[in-house]
Image (cartoon, rainbow, N blue to C red):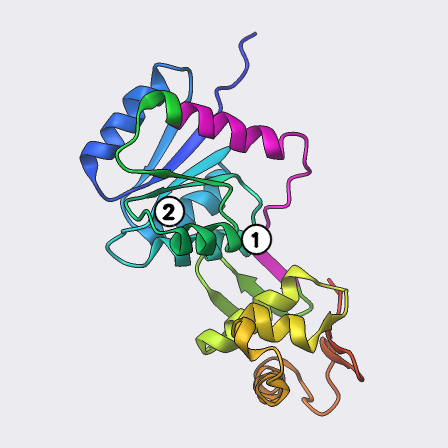
Amino acid sequence: MNAQPQTILIIEDEVQIRRFVRSSLASHGYALLEAGSGQEGVEHAAQSRPDCVILDLGLPDMEGLEVLRRIRSWSAVPIVILTARGQEQDKIALLDAGADDYLTKPFGVGELLARLRAAMRRTAGLPATEQPVMRIGDIRIDMAHRQVSRNGEAIHLTPIEYRLLVALLRHQGRVVTQRQLLQEVWGPEYGDAGHYLRIYMQHLRHKLEDDPARPRYLLTEPGVGYRLKDEA
């Protein structure tokens, strides 16, 4: 009985590049999924659970870096970036955001295949962690669509509130220090801006807790940081 072919998702708006990648991968036994926009790519990644993602940076609806961050908020799938940018700083930003590797355009078939194989080898045998939809009590977080609801009612979160909630989700059940949250949500230059964090934690509690003064989920660990309670 033949094994199922590995599935590669390419998120790329240029039809010619998708066609080139499709024919190259098909001739080497891979199956291909295609997305022409960032949002479509995020949804494919959530629904189809590919073995690897090829992601272009220049997409029509959002920056590839944002697509990378969205997928990384729930998934450890290998991600190889396609970029026309050769600056070292750009490459560092991509790797820091969770990319496994990158290819600079133009690229050849041999290099593409080698980087895909290397990226998938690094995650071979790791447990599947993809859970694009999370629930904590009566709160539902759909990370593929960036939607949050409570008791079935949609809750509007600002971009910073949402990033803070996702940062806590990544470490659910564990204490996260103030400095770590500030750096993950605002950036490394905000490591000492604890007042930002207190303000936005208050905002989240008012939107997600029954009694913000006595939170059930978004807990303070005095003198250390915050913890999202691990409760189904």
Residue at the (52%, 39%) spot, across then down = 78
Which residue is situated farthest in the right direction here? 222
Q: Where is residue 132 in the image (x, y as percent from the top left)?
A: 54, 53
Q: Amino acid type of disc 2?
A: Gly
Q: Amino acid type of disc 1?
A: Trp
Total marks placed: 2
Does residue 202 appear in the picture of this structure? Answer: yes
Give the crowd class for mark 1: few <14, some 14-19, many >=20 residues within 10 Å.
many
| Drawn side of residue 136 relative to residue 146, left or right | right
Q: Give the range drawn in magenta.
A: 112-135
Which quadrant would residue 126 be assigned to in this image? Answer: top right
Rendered-image quadrant of the N terminus: top right
Give the crowd class for mark 2: few <14, some 14-19, many >=20 residues within 10 Å.
many
Does residue 228 appear in the picture of this structure? Answer: no
Residue at the (65%, 70%) spot, across then down = 180
Q: Position of residue 124 (x, y in %)?
A: 63, 30
| Mark identifier at residue 41 | 2
Q: Is mark 1 on a helix, strand or loop?
A: loop
| Mark identifier at residue 74 | 1
The answer to whether residue 171 is above or below residue 178 is above
